[in-house]
Amino acid sequence: MSFHAITMFVRWAVSADQKTAELLNSLRDLPIATRKIDPRTISIVQDLKYRWSRGTKIERLATLGWIEHDCIMLFCEMLDTLDNLRSQYAEQVRLNGTPPELRDEDLQAYERAIWSENKKIELKKEL
């Protein structure tokens, strides 16, 4: 699974419409052992993979190395921090405005940012 999948899960969850936000809240309230086998959780993760794998290039990046079980676990763990993520997202929107839609034209900038971060990690390993 790619780091981009994590980004896409978070972006999707914090920008959800009211109906989806209520569903996420009800899933969050379940114990994690129940949440990870709940048909709604599984359906959400499968639906996101389906949409992203047929979407823009930048969306398709989220499905690289997709392992459904791992993605379900990640999604369930993300729900535990959803209130904090929403709060941080709202603060960033207040400071910086709503982020633009993901466009393939942005892919080069995204790849440059990933390359730069990977380089920083490599440099830290060398020290």
Image (spheres, rainbow, N blue to C red):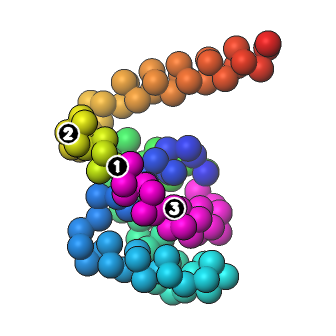
Q: Is residue 81 above or below residue 7?
A: below
What's the amino acid at mark 2? Gly
Residue on which disc 1 sits:
89
Between discs 3 and 1, the one toward the N terminus? 3
Query: Are the residues tagged 3 and 1 within 8 Å (C-beta)?
Result: no
Q: Position of residue 99 (x, y in %)?
A: 25, 41
CA gap, disc 3 and disc 1: 12 Å
What's the amino acid at mark 3? Thr
Q: Position of residue 49 (x, y in %)?
A: 45, 63
What's the amino acid at mark 1? Tyr
Q: Label 3 crowding class (10 Å Cα cut-off): few <14, some 14-19, many 20+?
A: few
Q: Using the rendered image of the protein, determine whether residue 54 is visible from the camera's viewpoint.
A: no
- The quarter of the rendered structure image containing the C terminus is top right
Q: Is residue 29 above or below residue 17?
A: below
For label 3, the SS is loop
Residue on which disc 3 sits:
81
Instruction: Examine the structure image and report whether residue 5 is included in the region drawn in magenta.
Output: no
* Residue lying at 54% horizontally and 67% vertically, measured from the top left: 80
Task: Give the residues in magenta.
Answer: 66-88
CA gap, disc 1 and disc 2: 10 Å
